[in-house]
Amino acid sequence: VQVKTVAAMSVRKDKSKCYRPSLRHGLTKKIYSPGDIDIFAIYVIPEDLWYFIPRSETKNSGSLYLFAHVENSTEKYFKYRNNYNSFF
């Protein structure tokens, strides 16, 4: 498990607001390989929400777009919001 946090919103090119956590190693900024971790545990501080996203779902992305501030979002990762079942 790799724990990440995000505290500030970003604005996408289409002007929508989202949280965009980095999925890279600290100083090296390398993308985690599939053998490094199984799950990203991402805490969105302002919304007090966790996302438990399997590494396989992130492909080789260096970051994600999370719409934690939108109730019942249709975002790709909504099903991983507060989904503690990822560990069982």
Image: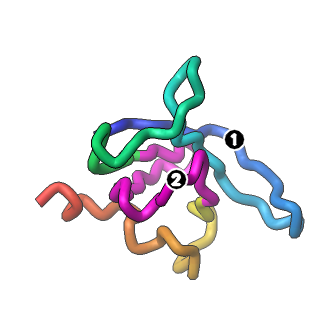
Residue identifier under label 1? 8
The percent position of residue 84, horizontal first and vertical second, equals 24, 59
Residue placed most toward the observer, 8 or 36: 36
Marks 1 and 2, how far apart at CA: 23 Å
**Which corner quadrant holds the N terminus?**
top left
Name which residue type carries label 1. Ala
Q: Is residue 58 magenta?
A: yes
Q: Position of 18 compared to 68: left or right?
A: right
Q: Residue at x 46, y 37 (%)?
A: 4
Residue 17, image x and y in percent?
77, 60
User: What range of the chain is rendered magenta?
Assistant: 42-65
Considering only order in the chain, which callout, 2 or 1, is on the residue closer to the N terminus? Answer: 1
Residue at point 36% right, 60% down?
56
Mark 2 crowdedness (10 Å alpha carbons): few <14, some 14-19, many ≥20: some
Query: Closest to the observer: 7 or 27?
Result: 27
- Of all residues, the one furthest to the top in this rendering is 27
Residue behind mark 2: 60
Horizontally, is 63 left or right of 31 in the view? right
Can you say whether 50 is above or below 70 in the image? above
Query: Residue 24 at x, y = what percent?
Result: 53, 35
- What element does badge 1 sit on? loop
